């Protein structure tokens, strides 16, 4: 029963989705508020308890379910490398994705503050989005080969294609190539972009079928199945044992061998 649930969106930014511009940000805010979602901007969470959340402005919200979506920081593993970092712990790299002071090391994506050479201005770095990470991956791979062959390395240059936001149903806000869109046109661009990014025909067929079924039957329910029966840890998500103590590593090795 929807009457038993209250949604409250908290964002430390002074505006909603500032990357999209004021007009589209206000349009998205209007969509959320029309759905009954409460929105608090310019504040963050100071403390989370079992039955309430305290905001930095002193307000206390009754809460039993907290969903934290701060996913634009580098992995804590980056801080163990001893290299210079910036921008939420991301490694400082050269335009060809090399890590200064670490011979033969390259970094990209969420782990790297890659200089934005395509119009970001002095000191600007590429945002940690899939649009950049995929292209940086190809440049990094080419540069690894070039470094082994002793040939010149290529700098990463990519003009941002814009942002797309799927708000569900017929609602969306998008800014492809600097053109502001909202409503159904924005939703079509958002879903079309994400659908085209899928790599296999099976995945495209499955996703398109789900969208068509949801359009007819309504209610978008998605079950990922990941970590369904046990709490997730950073080690599980990153597929690494670097966060384990030596005792835990020995116990895990013994269990695997047994």
Image: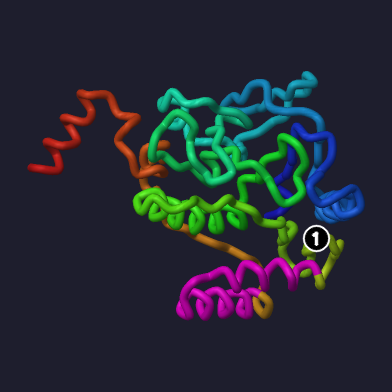
Q: Secondary structure at mark 1?
A: strand
Q: Quadrant of residue 142?
A: bottom left
User: Bounds of the magenta span?
Assistant: 186-214
Tell me the residue at 11%/36% (across/down).
254
Q: Magenta-highlighted stretch: main secondary structure? A: helix
Q: Position of residue 17 (x, y in %)?
A: 78, 46
Residue 79 included in the magenta stretch of the image: no
All told, the count of numbered labels is 1
- Residue 237 is left or right of residue 27, and the answer is left
- Residue 214 is left or right of residue 104, and the answer is right
Tell me the residue at 60%/29% (across/down).
86
Which quarter of the figure is the N terminus placed in?
bottom right
Tell me the residue at 84%/34% (across/down).
14
Q: Position of residue 111 (x, y in %)?
A: 51, 39
Q: Position of residue 51 (x, y in %)?
A: 61, 28
Instruction: Pick the residue in front: 5 or 245.
Output: 245
**Above or below, comparing residue 155 to residue 199 in the picture:** above
* Residue tagged 1: 175
């Amino acid at each position: 029963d929807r009457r038993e649930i209250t949604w409250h969106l908290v964002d430390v930014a002074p505006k909603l989705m500032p990357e999209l511009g004021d007009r589209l940000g206000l349009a998205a805010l209007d969509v959320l508020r029309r759905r009954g979602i409460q929105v608090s901007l310019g504040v963050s969470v100071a403390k989370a308890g079992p039955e309430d959340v305290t905001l930095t402005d002193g307000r206390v919200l009754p809460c039993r379910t907290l969903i934290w979506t701060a996913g634009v920081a580098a992995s804590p593993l980056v801080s163990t490398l001893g290299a210079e970092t910036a921008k939420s712990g991301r490694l400082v790299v050269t335009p060809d994705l090399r890590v200064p002071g670490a011979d033969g090391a390259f970094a990209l994506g969420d782990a790297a503050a890659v200089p934005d050479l395509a119009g970001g201005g002095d000191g600007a770095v590429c945002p940690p989005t899939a649009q950049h990470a995929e292209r940086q991956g190809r440049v990094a791979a080419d540069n690894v080969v070039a470094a082994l062959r002793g040939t010149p390395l290529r700098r990463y240059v990519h003009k941002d294609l814009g942002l797309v936001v799927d708000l569900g149903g017929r609602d969306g806000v998008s800014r492809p190539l600097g053109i502001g869109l909202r409503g159904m046109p924005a939703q079509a661009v958002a879903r079309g972009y994400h659908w085209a990014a899928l790599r296999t025909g099976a995945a495209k067929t499955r996703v398109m079928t789900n969208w068509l079924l949801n359009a007819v039957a309504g209610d978008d329910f998605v079950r990922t199945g990941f970590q369904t029966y046990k709490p997730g840890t950073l080690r599980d998500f990153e597929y690494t044992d670097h966060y384990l103590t030596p005792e835990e590593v020995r116990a895990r090795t013994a269990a695997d061998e047994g």
